[in-house]
Amino acid sequence: MTSHLKKVELHCHLEGAAPPALTLAQARKYNIDLSAYLSDGAYVWHDFASFLECYDKVSEVYKSEEDYALLTETYLEELASIGTIYSELIVSPDHGKRIGLGAEAYIAGVCEGIRRAREAHGIEARLIVTGERHFGPESVIGAAEYAAKAKNPLITGFNLAGEERMGRVADYARAFDIARDAGLGLTIHAGEVCGAFSVEDALNDVRPSRIGHGVRAIENPDLVKRLADQGAVLEVCPGSNIALKVFPDFAAHPLRKLKEAGVRVTISSDDPPFFHTSLKREYELASEAFGFSDSEINDLTRTGIEAAFVDEETRRALLARL
Ligand SMILES: [Zn+2]
């Protein structure tokens, strides 16, 4: 049982966290038939292509600023109910544009949801703006410019998500330069779909303080040592990795090996209901599947706060709550 432990989450895609019950209510509100993608309170998909299709269909029922406030508030409420004190949500202003809502209204809705959840439950949250690799470098630079110019105190990080096999990291370095110059924290998806080389590319070309996933670094012992020496933090999402068959099972998952090699690791849920997981389950897995003690799990949580994209005063307050 890990219900008594404080929790933090650094890697969760907002649309990917949409609770099925809320999605169902939204689908009814907009008269959208989701029966092929949502049944018995769970999202339905069977391979990577149908996962993406399901994800898009679910995103379609969140249309307005208020929808995004409600989505954000509902997810943070769920996190707070299991003892979570801090959450970083990965958001895509481009997604707001693509659905016709606009980046400003999309972000305003999300920020309103954060405000409501903080007021009601005391949970602290920040936003990581992400570029999406499969839309190409220009679109990712646009996302970085948006994040840099937003001057929104809740936008504190920049990420690169999407199809990892598309282009090389160097193609996206300029977007990260823009985000770095604006003082944003940097993290990048790597070492999930692609092997250790993608983590090396990320370290060399982007110089991030954190890597999203990064677990396939385990394929190269020199790289594992480099991660440990540099103190780079991995946002590890075990449930997601198993759902997407990055590793065959939890016994083969390198979370414990990485921690024992001195790599700073944290745990997150990625796109929780799509992978039939939750932050609650990830913490339970840390205990039951990986055999971490309470104090080892608290180490993961403390690392999460140390690596969080927050000001030092907020970091101290979070560490004090741990
Ligand atoms: Zn992710």
Image (cartoon, helix red, strand yellow):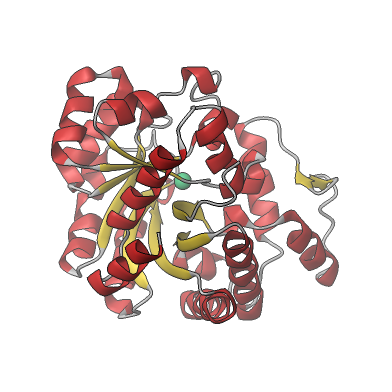
Q: Residue placed at 52% from the left, 77% from the top?
A: 118
User: Is residue 212 depicted above or below 309 in this figure?
Assistant: above
| Residue 44 x/y as whole percent | 75, 40
**To which quarter of the image does residue 156 belong?**
bottom left
Q: Residue placed at 27% from the left, 37% from the top?
A: 168
Q: Quadrant of the N terminus?
A: top right
Left or right? Give the position of 225 relative to 69.
left
Q: Nearer the viewer, residue 101 or 309?
A: 309
Left or right? Give the position of 142 relative to 36.
left
Q: Residue placed at 61% from the left, 63% from the top?
A: 75
| Residue 161 x/y as whole percent | 41, 48
User: Is residue 154 depicted above or below 289 in this figure?
Assistant: below
Q: Nearer the viewer, residue 48 or 23?
A: 23
Q: Is residue 142 visible?
A: no
**To which quarter of the image does residue 170 belong?**
top left
User: Is residue 179 depicted above or below 278 in this figure?
Assistant: below
Q: Nearer the viewer, residue 136 or 93?
A: 93
Q: Nearer the viewer, residue 240 or 320?
A: 320
